[in-house]
Image: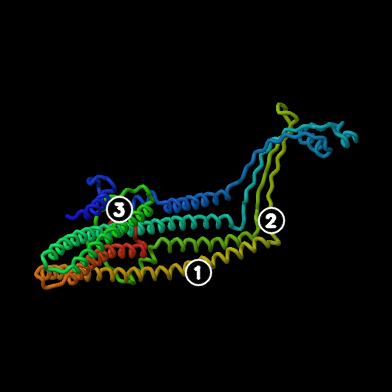
Amino acid sequence: MKSHQFPALILGLLLFTGGGSSFAEEPLTLRQAIDMAMAQNAEVAVAQADGKVAQAEARSARTNLLPSLQFTEDISRGNDPVYAFGTRLRQGAFTQADFGLNALNRPEAIGNFSTRFSGSWTAFDSFKTQREIRRADLSEKSAALASRSVNQRIALDVVRAYQSILYAQREVEVAQHEQETASALLSAVEERVKAGLAVESDQMLAEVNSAARRQDLIVAEGDMQLAWADLREAVGSPQLQISGLKALEPRTYPEAALEEELGSAMKARPDLLALAESQAAQAVGVKAAKSALGPRVNAYGNWEEDRGALDRSGGNNWTVGAQVSIDILPLGKRAQLAQENAAQERVNAQAALSMQRARLEVTRAHIRRQTEKLSMATAQAAMEQSAESLRIVRNRYRAGLATITDLLRAEDAERQSQSNYWHAVYGNVVAYAELLFATGNLTPEAAEVLQ
């Protein structure tokens, strides 16, 4: 083996072992990678937080049905005539002498300790509160469905990155084999030149071919590093170490008609379902804005005790009542209603656009899956044919019946056919994952069928 082969082989070993990790390490499966993403990806955490916010808002909306109750302890002192008169009256300490003109006009300063309980309750608000509660409930459902949509998109990112690594590993393996073959060919050509069986131009071509194969290996190793970076980003773990992955074997997946897949998408896609809930929530929001124009009935009451000192008793009083109010100039409320109507038009248009895009995504995924399936079969046949062709050309070259150019051309064709085949194999997996995503069925459990 030539000395220039050792650096590439050492680099390849380091790359596959993660810079010193154990060969005995269990391979990371696709399901494990998806589970890691569900637990660590920041986008998943953001979506879950949005769901918690929606839950809190739904609980908060229900508090408007409950009465409010306040406790107040007030300490005051002053000689304002009105304040002094009213305070003595509330304390139950008013005497005949307090009716004197001098006492009324220039009263002495008086202190007061006031303990008050007050409450209010909206008995009727034209059903505005009930509609706001309904709107919050629908928004909560929409947030939960939106979180599911994020989970499926992250799962698809993991599948793509995982397959990119597997494809890159195959490319590294092919590049390493081709480099070894190119080195062996260079050695053989050097011997043939020395024996007078080949010209120096053949040796130069072999040297160029060997250098090109080393370059291919460097590029393949770089591509694998980039694929690992994508997987780390998808699973949300920058510290994820390079390790072996569980390779996927070429396989076929269940098939369905395009119309059936479109129907499944309309029923199962969480982003479309989330928009449907948003539409319903906004429709209720419009009704709530209209309810704000209606009459309101509020009940209220308070109890108060006033005394001159904390350790004294004093007078107490209570008041209860009901209030009916109608906004006869609801300019702000009408502006709010106009805003809610505009928001409803927007969410309806967004839902229609999303439905249109979903149909296109399903159609594209369906066509790509069919294309990848056919490409895999074609690429396999081409790989077998190119391997046989290379075998024949090698034998002819050894017998002096073919030139080195013929041999290099056959090797290029065989190398490209291998790359095309594995690209089709892993592309077939990604295409099926994209179809599952487009139809709203790419759950972590469903992703197991990919492995």
Q: Quadrant of residue 374?
A: bottom left
- Residue 406 vertical placement versus 303 (above, below): below
- Residue that protrudes farthest toward the top in the picture: 311
> Sequence order check: which comes first, mark 3 or mark 1?
3
- The answer to whether 28 appears left or right of 79 in the picture is left
Q: Quadrant of the N terminus?
A: bottom left
Q: Nearer the viewer, residue 275 or 28?
A: 28
Residue 321 in view (yes/no): yes
Q: Earlier in the sequence, mark 2 or mark 3?
A: 3
The residue to which callout 2 is attached is 325
Q: In the image, 235: left or right of 403?
A: right
Amino acid on which the number 1 mark rests in the picture: Ala
Residue drawn at x 62%, y 51% is: 122
Question: Quick one: 203 or 150, which is closer to the camera?
Answer: 203
Q: Which residue is mark 3?
A: 31
User: In the drawing, what numbered circle is on residue 349?
Assistant: 1
**In the image, what residue type sits under mark 3?**
Arg
Q: Residue at x 84, y 31 (%)?
A: 108
Looking at the image, is mark 1 or mark 2 earlier in the sequence?
2
Asked which secondary structure carries label 1, the reply is: helix
Which class describes the residues within 10 Å of circle 3: few (<14), some (14-19), or many (20+)? many
**Could you tell me which secondary element the residue under label 2 belongs to?**
strand
Residue 324 disc label: none
Q: Looking at the picture, does residue 403 appear above or below residue 56?
A: below
Q: Number of callouts in the render?
A: 3
